[in-house]
Amino acid sequence: MNALTLDQVLTDAENLPLDEREMLEDLLRKRRIDSWRVETTAAAAFRAGKLKPQPVEDIIAHLRAAK
């Protein structure tokens, strides 16, 4: 798969109709908020001692399964 550059993505986004560009902006903002919530929740759980130590291999396997 060919990786797109940021410039290519921006050019493609600029070529979208206005309503689709607005929808794209809204979707990106919502995804950014969701990511922030997940990171914040994980950090809070870590600080509260709710996360158990795990082998790195288990964490990587869990992340790969979540895709």
Image: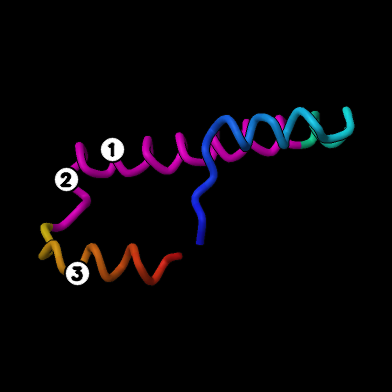
Confirm or deny contact between disc 2 and disc 1 (CB under 8 A): no
| Quarter of the figure with residue 12 | top right
Alpha carbon of mark 1 to alpha carbon of mark 3: how far? Answer: 19 Å
Residue occupying image coordinates x 42% and y 43%: 38
Image spot of residue 50 (x, y percent): 22, 50
Dominant secondary structure (helix, strand or loop) of the stretch shown in magenta: helix
Circle 1 sits on which residue? 43
Q: Amino acid at mark 3?
A: Asp
For this view, does 48 lie left or right of residue 29?
left
Specify start and end residues of the magenta stretch as a single range.
24-52
Alpha carbon of mark 3 to alpha carbon of mark 2: how far? Answer: 19 Å
Image: 67 above or below 34:
below
Circle 1 — which element? helix
Circle 2 sits on which residue? 49
Q: Amino acid at mark 1?
A: Ala
Front-lying residue, 30 or 28: 28
| Quarter of the figure with residue 52 | bottom left
Mark closer to the chain start, 1 or 3: 1
Circle 3 sits on which residue? 58
Examine the structure image and report whether residue 31 is included in the region drawn in magenta.
Answer: yes
Mark closer to the chain start, 2 or 1: 1
Residue occupying image coordinates x 73% and y 33%: 13
Look at discs 3 and 2 and give the one toward the viewer. Answer: 3
Front-lying residue, 54 or 11: 11
Image spot of residue 39 (x, y percent): 37, 39
